[in-house]
Amino acid sequence: MTATSRKEKATETESALKAAAKRVFARKGYLNTKITDITAEAGRAAGSFYNHFASKEELLEALLADIAASGDESADSENHSADFSDPAAVRWHVKQYWDFYRDNAATMLALRQAAMVSDSFARTVAQFGASQAADLDDHLVYITRAGMRLPADPGRCGMLIYHLVDSFAARWLHGPTPDGDPPADEEAVEMLTQFVYRGLTGRDY
């Protein structure tokens, strides 16, 4: 086997392990998942896992890096307005995060579960949220420029927006809930957009 084909096979195995982990996390939860569950799901030998990851925790960190990169690429690839005095701009960002969370719900749930038992993961999740919120700072300046007053400084408003949208997505996108069926994507995005915009500006749209 050539060096190129070995590298391709290794990349294929790593991708298979990641995909399998997401499926198993969705079924069993992160805390109940064993490495052998992941390798069995991937159709790989149990020992092959350690050629790519030192632990289940390291695999989860790799999944977080993947989804963070994909989220950045998605945002960078689309033209969008940063002017949060315009409800259309707020809606675009709400929808982007809702879609991102829905597409990565298994990994996001695994991160939440890992954070409950690991200080390191708790810090990692907090840093992820802080980076998402910080991206909104320059967007919120447009509100004050338009003559409206923010309810708090931009940094805290960004954190409020992030935690509101993230918590609402977590509530509904992790499977069945005792409160009934989740809202449709468009309904959820519209509710969140109205709530965020009104909270930031004190205005309806």
Image: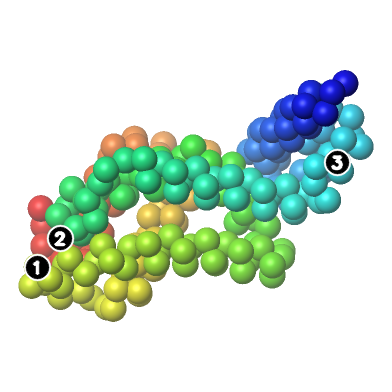
Q: Secondary structure at mark 3?
A: helix
Amino acid type at image mark 3: Asn
**Dots 2, 1 in contact, CB < 8 A:** yes
Mark before the other along the chain sequence, 3 or 2: 3
Q: Secondary structure at mark 2?
A: loop
User: Colour scheme of this structure image?
Assistant: rainbow
Q: Residue 1: horizontal and vertical position, in percent? A: 88, 21
Please tell me the numbered disc located at residue 51: 3
Mark before the other along the chain sequence, 1 or 3: 3
- To which residue does mark 1 refer? 146
**Dots 1, 3 in contact, CB < 8 A:** no
- To which residue does mark 2 refer? 85
Within 10 Å of the Cα at label 1, are there few (<14), some (14-19), or many (20+) other Cα atoms? few
Q: Is residue 123 left or right of residue 147?
A: right
Amino acid type at image mark 2: Ser
Q: CA distance from mark 2 to mark 1?
A: 7 Å
Which residue is drawn at the image coordinates 43% and 55% (left, top)? 166
